[in-house]
């Protein structure tokens, strides 16, 4: 009944176990990176080089999938380290240590956990603190836009910002700084940049549209989960994975990561610490965000929210705006392809070993740049993979029975001035899994020639099998009960359809 409060017991933010799909490889020293300071120094140098590579080649994937991928990531993964691995303050990431001793496979499983439920249950949207933003009729609260000095985007309603706590004009400590205009959502990471925050807003607006149709809170959540899961499985996955691998997984189920019951489900470290980080390569340096900011630099997108609601393009505490200004509402039509624009106005960067330089200048929740090592996303990724003892790309390729990239193909993916360091450390033959997957995706040769437009066979297999398993054991799983043809005919079971469902009335349909 519309307006009825329904109890939806969803235990969210729980830690779930991690593991390896290829445990025998993670336990074999010959299938891991060599454990030495030379290796650590080489991957650190490689990460630094990737952070400042000037390449900005566009691919064929619309940029909306970059941030849908991030939204998915925040819904099912979050790496938590055992306190014993952290710094003396109990907070410092162990990858910051000058000397890193890689964990054994057993210790990685024992000392690392996944901070999300690893299910496609939209707990990043419905769980934890988000319960404080539910209205009496089961709809979800949004914040009204604040007025801007120029370039207002015309909207039918003003509810286009995440629900936020009040502004704190004079925060007294770090705790108050974090609470200042803090987003009231299930996972605060969905407020770390403007586009993923607007994605979260779009999902809330879609939920509220379902409530307006007469669905109860519980039924609207079920309807959203099913639309979301189907969009992940039949829209996102075929967009970013190798078609042969995708069709095999959809038709036959997983071949390597096989789970027969829910209790056996774990977050594969090959996925969370390597394969799924492919999206970092897709991030552009600037976006044609709307008619006012066309284009706008990614640095601005990050400092605009930066996990604190400090809505300002400058570093440090700022009180210019209580909520998102009305000139920053996203124009989603620019992020999809359409009849009018067969190629998206914002194509993602190719999936390859190049990252936009903006990802070498990461910032904290106040918008201040981190110190050198933690500011460079590529360096973080490579050092984390080394710490966790991930198998090499070549070892997994051999296990999958697919041709591995040869040394020359790996070397060609490394900035020329760093190739000697990589070859001296032997990383062209035993390559960090994350870098290997990016090199494989960027390879213009081989079966289905990815050429930066989708993942290769190793990355595709790990990503597709992990997502299939997670959806299979999710609440309201579409793999257990598929949508009807009538439901699919609405178009609402795609990413485009979900966003269009709650689209502001002043914006043209995304199906035009």
Image (cartoon, grey):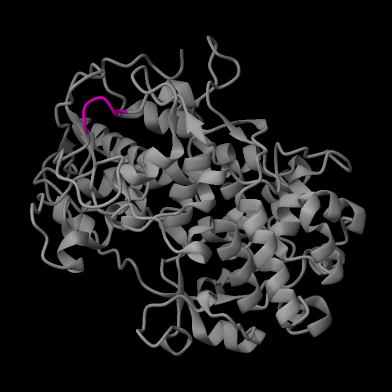
Which residue appears at 8% of the width and 46% of the height? 136
Q: Residue furthest top?
A: 340
Front residue of 507/212: it is 507
How far across and down, in percent of the image, does residue 365 sit?
31, 57
Task: Determine the image quadrant of residue 23.
Answer: bottom right
Q: Magenta segment: does it hold 264?
A: no
- Tell me if I can see residue 45 in this picture: yes
Image spot of residue 79 (x, y percent): 48, 70
For residue 494, above or below residue 269:
above
Query: What residue lies at 53% left-to-right and 65% top-to-bottom?
Result: 373
Point out residue 511 in the picture as x, y percentages from the top left corner.
46, 17
**Placement of the N terminus among the 4 image quadrants:** top left
What secondary structure characterizes most of the magenta part? Answer: loop
Judge whether residue 328 is colored magenta. yes
Figure disc tally: 0
Quarter location, residue 401:
bottom right
Q: Is residue 281 above or below residue 121?
A: above
| Relative side of 328 to 241, left or right | left
Task: Name the quadrant containing residue 383.
Answer: bottom right
- Residue located 38% across and 31% down the image: 499
Q: Is residue 128 left or right of residue 461?
A: left
Which of these two is toward me, 460 or 212? 460
Residue sitting nearer the eye, 203 or 254: 203
Percent across and percent down for residue 293 are 37, 23
Q: Which residues are magenta?
A: 325-329
Q: Outermost residue toward the front? A: 417
Q: Is residue 215 above or below residue 62?
A: below
Residue 230 visible? The answer is no
């Amino acid at each position: 009944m519309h307006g009825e409060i329904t109890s939806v017991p969803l235990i969210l933010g729980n830690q779930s176990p991690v593991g390896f799909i290829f445990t025998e490889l993670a336990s074999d020293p010959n299938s891991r990176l060599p454990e030495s300071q030379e290796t650590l120094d080489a991957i650190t140098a490689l990460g630094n080089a990737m952070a400042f590579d000037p390449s900005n080649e566009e691919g064929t994937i619309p940029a909306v999938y970059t941030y849908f991928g991030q939204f998915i990531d925040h819904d099912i993964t979050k790496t938590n380290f055992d306190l014993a691995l952290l710094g003396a303050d109990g907070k410092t990431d162990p990858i910051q240590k000058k000397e890193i001793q890689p964990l054994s496979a057993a210790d990685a499983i024992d000392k690392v956990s996944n901070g999300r439920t690893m299910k496609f249950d939209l707990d990043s949207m419905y769980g934890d603190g988000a319960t404080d933003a539910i209205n009496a009729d089961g709809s979800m609260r949004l914040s009204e836009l604040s007025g801007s000095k120029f370039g207002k985007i015309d909207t039918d309603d003003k509810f286009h910002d995440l629900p936020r706590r009040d502004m704190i004009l004079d925060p007294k400590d770090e705790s108050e700084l974090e609470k200042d205009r803090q987003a009231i959502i299930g996972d605060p990471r969905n407020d770390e940049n403007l586009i993923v925050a607007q994605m979260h807003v779009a999902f809330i607006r879609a939920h509220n549209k379902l409530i307006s149709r007469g669905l109860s809170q519980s039924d609207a959540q079920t309807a959203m989960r099913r639309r979301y899961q189907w969009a992940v499985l039949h829209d996102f996955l075929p967009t970013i994975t190798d078609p042969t691998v995708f069709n095999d997984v959809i038709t036959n189920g997983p071949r390597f990561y096989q789970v027969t019951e829910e209790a056996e489900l774990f977050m594969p470290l090959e996925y969370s610490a390597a394969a799924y980080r492919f999206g970092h390569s897709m991030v552009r340096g600037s976006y044609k965000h709307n008619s006012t900011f066309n284009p706008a630099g990614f640095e601005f997108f990050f400092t605009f929210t930066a996990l604190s609601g400090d809505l300002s393009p400058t570093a440090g505490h700022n009180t210019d705006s209580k909520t998102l200004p009305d000139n920053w509402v996203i124009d989603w039509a620019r992020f999809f392809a359409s009849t009018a624009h067969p190629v998206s106005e914002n194509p993602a960067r190719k999936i390859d070993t190049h990252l936009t330089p903006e990802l070498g200048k990461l910032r904290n929740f106040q918008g201040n740049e981190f110190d050198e090592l933690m500011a460079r996303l590529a360096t973080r990724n490579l050092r984390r993979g080394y710490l966790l003892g991930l198998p090499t790309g070549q070892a997994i390729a051999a296990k999958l029975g697919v041709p591995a990239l040869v040394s020359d193909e790996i070397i060609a993916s490394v900035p020329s001035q760093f190739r000697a360091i990589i070859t001296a450390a032997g990383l062209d033959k035993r390559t960090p899994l994350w870098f290997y997957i990016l090199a494989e995706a960027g390879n213009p040769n081989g079966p289905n020639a990815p050429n930066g437009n989708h993942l290769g066979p190793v990355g595709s297999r790990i990503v597709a099998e992990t997502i299939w398993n997670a959806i299979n054991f999710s609440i309201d799983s579409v793999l257990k009960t598929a949508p009807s043809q009538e439901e699919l005919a609405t178009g609402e079971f795609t990413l485009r359809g979900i966003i269009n469902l709650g689209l502001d009335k002043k914006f043209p349909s995304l199906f035009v």
